[in-house]
Image: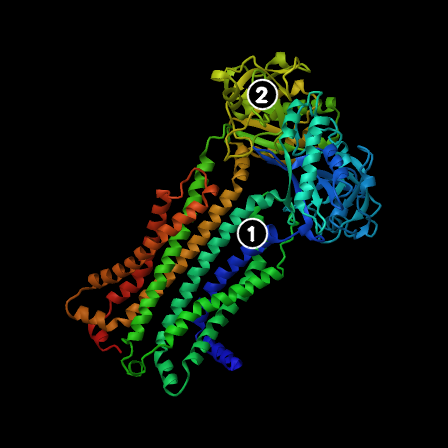
Amino acid sequence: MLMRDLRYAVRTLFQNPGFTLVAAGSLALAIGGSMAVFTLLNAVVLRSLPVHEPDRIFQALRATKNETAGRLAWPAIQRAQKELPGRAEIAAVSSIAGMQLEPEGRGAGKAERGTVQLVSGEYFELLRQRPQRGRLLTGSDNITVGAHPVAVISDPYWRRQLSASENAVGSSLTINGTVFTVVGIAERRFFGTTLTVRSPDVWIPLVMQPVVRYAQNASSHDGGDTRKPWPPQETIEWLSVFVRVPRGTDPSTIAAALTVQRQREAETFFSGGGFENMRDTVRGEKILLEPASRGLSPFRDNVSSPLFVLLAMMVVLLAIACGNVAGLLIARASAREREIAIRLSIGAGRMQLVRQMLTESLLLGAGAGVAGVLVAFWSRDALLKMFAPTANLITMDISVDARVLTVAVGVSLMTGVACGILPAIRGTRVSLADALKAESRGTSGGRRSLFVGKALVTLQMAFCLLALVVAALFVRSLRVLTSMDIGFDREQVVTARLDVRSLGYTAEQRQALYERILDRMRQIPGVTSASLSLNGPLAGPERIGGFGIEGYTPGQGERLSSNEEVVTADYFDTVGLRLLRGRLFGPEDHTPGNRNTIVNETIARRFFKNGDAIGKRWSWGSPVGPDAFVIAGVVEDAKYVELRTPPPNMVYQLAAAQDDEVLSDLEIRTAGSSATITATVRQALAESEPRLPVLDVMPLSGRMAQRVSQDTLIARLTSIFSAIALFLACLGLYGTISYGINRRVPEIGLRMALGADRRSVLGLILREALLLVLLGATVGVPLAYFAGRSLRTMLYEIPPLDPIAYGAGGILLIAVSILAAFLPARRASRIEPMVALNHN
């Protein structure tokens, strides 16, 4: 029986290729988009780490009343290892850093940019990893600072850079100028505990931090010196901590033990010696264990919300497509009334006909599902690239796995049922006497089908308005973000990111390099000034340190911190930061150890009455001692990393007084367009130092674009999806109006025979179409409002009930809908009365 229904359904669909292509194409478009988004969502948000028992892995976090932080100092982690109860295990890992990698045999000067992660010796054991070749890092590789030049490489790096050489283990690998020995190759699927677009190429012992000059994502407090080796320092927090909790052990028990040990440190290691601020903070901390089965991922944090929004948009698009196809099936069933009536009259059961019609819709759903999976398979890499536009190499695994295929099958079946159940039930509920008459076009079944079709169009219009308003909200939010005043001059400043650390220069060599670079930049025609800085505007990562202000007493549990920027003297003129009070750096400040600094307006307003900060003193750590820094000037606030948050505390120190600092950002002010000299800047940098890795050269407006890339992407994709939704909804409106006109040809002919002109018929049809649109909008407005409220954290300074977004969405919906209805309405107005009155 099932095979008979399948054969009949296939034959019926092939007899109507136009209908089949339109219906299956609409569903395939919606299912394909949905599965492409879900495939990426599965890889980024849902999939667990490919390690043994990932559900037993937790991240240790420091929690106070005011914040939760995820990094600890290495000495504190070592003490925690000794205090762990039972068989619990602990390991530490740094952030992923870009470094210059040069495999053995590549040749001098042939280094390429790669990714490196520093880990403790227990890292691979905690994750229950086994080497593909050689061995992995162990505790014996992580004892003495700078004394363990061994490395484990990833499988993708081994295949990409070493051509899967059998001799890779034991070969040398130069990392930022230091030769390491490759001791092992990780398993093929292993990418570490940090999910990112480009996974680590190499893992090395964390005690090698000063050797490779790793300097990312650290918080320094109470005298922590980031220019000295980090591993021995108590107050430089730079490592994420993972804990494996044995089965049968409550994670809260481990967290409580770590909290007791952490608070004990407040009275032992931080009881004196200038650690007062750290001691007070640690006293108020407790350790939390958060599930980390999916690993850490700043990339996930950035894209998960946009992905869920896009998936919701695709569900809306799928609902519109289902309504569209259901309307087509209802019209098709109405056209088959006589056939259905004949089959019922000769003994066919109603449920048998429902089953056969439902089989047709299930076949449509299945075909659309197969096409959708193929679309998802082909488009997943392009979609990921959209979410990571600056990545020059993508190694993230976004394969189609069992979960994706299961969801695809489920969506296809649900789509088939959703499209077909109502047409099947309505189509088989016919009056045999009316349907078997020759003049069967005006049957009550046809009128009921028309009513159901109009109801479906109304729902499609509601969902379409929802999609249009959501897209308009994101476009409006993006416009506000891109037009904000960030404090810097975006249009006439070119920036370049430099990897000076990889050269391994001494302080004197670096200073000579800086002078060569700045002199060469000033020789470029059109350049009015040039400067170097530690981090640079809109570049990141931030360098944050705890600090104290003379005369300001922190509240209980309050940890004062500030972002730090080290700059050359022309920095403020180059990037366009205005001086508000005091003075900028001058020749008198160019002496080693000079204590004059500049702060931003946020610090001046927060800590000093009337913003009068000139001459006041501050220091890294607390209390403020005799060697404190002095505030010589106050400059206006600027957005350094995050555009959506208020400007952070910011202190500027002069590079000439901090000769140990490694400046990594170049800023150039031009008299003309900044976009025209990027190639010249890159060439000039190569002339200044051929070995210097230049990571990027772009106008500051380009960095701004990178900062809003996720907002730009979601605005574009929601706009595209809403346009598709509008097309499908208007296609459904067109089909319903056309079907209604075909049913009402005699009525229209009678109206025209009684004196109605073409314009009145045209107006009648357009008014009916407009009524459907307005009814849909009545339902769509509250849907859009609730959607806007749920998305308000993703919108910047745009209310959920933004009148411009709703007005634009409504006007566009009405305009395009009227255009879609105009074509069949015009055809109706041209019907000849005599032909219509004889129409059967």
Q: Secondary structure at mark 1?
A: helix
Note whether residue 490 is visible.
yes
In the rendered structure, the answer to whether residue 331 lies left or right of residue 640 reads: left
Q: x%, y% of residue 175?
A: 76, 38
- Can you say which quadrant of the picture contains the C terminus? bottom left
Question: Mark 2 highlights which residue?
Answer: 570
In the rendered structure, the answer to whether residue 514 lies left or right of residue 485 reads: right
Q: Secondary structure at mark 2?
A: loop
Q: What amino acid does circle 2 point to? A: Asp
Q: Residues within 10 Å of mark 1 (few under 14, many from 20)?
A: some
Q: CA distance from mark 2 to mark 1?
A: 41 Å
Nearer the camera: disc 2 or disc 1: 1
**Relative vertical location of residue 271 with respect to residue 551 in this rendering, above or below:** below
Q: x%, y% of residue 735?
A: 35, 66
Q: Check residue 549 in the rendering and tell me which mark sits there, or answer none.
A: none
Which residue is located at x 42 percent, y 56 percent?
725
Question: Total marks drawn?
Answer: 2
Note whether residue 832 is visible.
no
Q: Quadrant of residue 552?
A: top right
Q: x%, y% of residue 423?
A: 39, 71
Question: Mark 1 highlights which residue?
Answer: 383
